[in-house]
């Protein structure tokens, strides 16, 4: 699938995957769902769910390193800044042939436009937080978060997911 088609699909995901609310219980449910999915699949991940400025759920599974926590922080910063999926921001920059540093003056030490952080929007309120994972290839990080949100919202993941990249 071409990057422009992926961007269109991510825009649909961002529009459809809106929560009725985001409180500590919702964050716990979402983070726990991702953690359980990771454990069942033998994945090594760091998982972070937050309202902007307030961590609500964090888990680092066995095999992760402090580097995974840094990736989570940097990817989440992209969602905080742009209210878009970190994967969508990265693809948009790639299409335009630029970087976060060149276009916005954002240092790579604090921002990573790689897949795995997704905006948490509340119906009627807009984007107020993010859910972020680190540990898989960026497209897989993105799809895992989308899958968990689909499960929570009882939406069909097969309709919203990004197709695997050709080998």
Image (tube, helix red, strand yellow):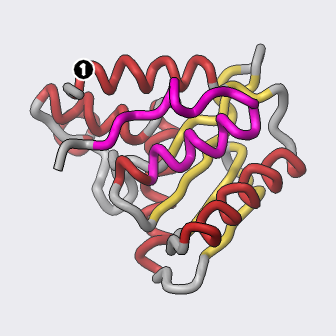
Mark yes or no: residue 54 visible.
yes
Q: Is residue 154 above or below residue 33?
A: above
| Residue 131, position as x, y percentages in the image | 61, 48
Residue 97 belongs to magenta span: no
Q: Main secondary structure of the magenta part?
A: helix
* Residue linked to disc 1: 4
Q: Nearer the viewer, residue 152 or 74?
A: 152
Q: Is residue 147 left or right of residue 19?
A: left
* Residue at x-position 73% and y-position 55%: 33
* Residue at x-position 39% and y-position 47%: 115
Mark yes or no: residue 55 visible.
no
Q: Quadrant of the rendered structure where residue 137 is?
A: bottom left
> Which stretch is magenta?
141-164
* Residue at x-position 43% and y-position 56%: 74
Q: Is residue 64 above or below residue 9?
A: below
Q: Quadrant of the rendered structure where residue 18 is?
A: top right
């Amino acid at each position: 699938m071409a990057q422009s088609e992926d961007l269109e699909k991510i825009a649909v995901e961002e529009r459809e995957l809106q929560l009725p609310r985001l409180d500590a219980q919702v964050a716990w449910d979402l983070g726990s769902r991702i953690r359980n999915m990771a454990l069942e699949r033998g994945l090594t991940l760091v998982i972070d769910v937050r309202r902007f400025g307030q961590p609500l759920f964090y888990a680092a599974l066995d095999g992760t390193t402090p580097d995974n926590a840094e990736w989570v922080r940097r990817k989440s910063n992209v969602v905080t800044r742009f209210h878009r999926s970190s994967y969508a921001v990265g693809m948009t920059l790639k299409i335009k042939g630029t970087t976060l540093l060149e276009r916005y003056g954002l240092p790579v030490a604090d921002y990573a436009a790689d897949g795995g952080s997704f905006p948490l929007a509340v119906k009627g309120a807009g984007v107020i937080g993010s859910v972020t994972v680190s540990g898989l290839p960026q497209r897989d990080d993105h799809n895992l978060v989308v899958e968990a949100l689909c499960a929570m919202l009882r939406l069909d993941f097969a309709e919203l997911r990004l197709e695997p990249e050709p080998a």
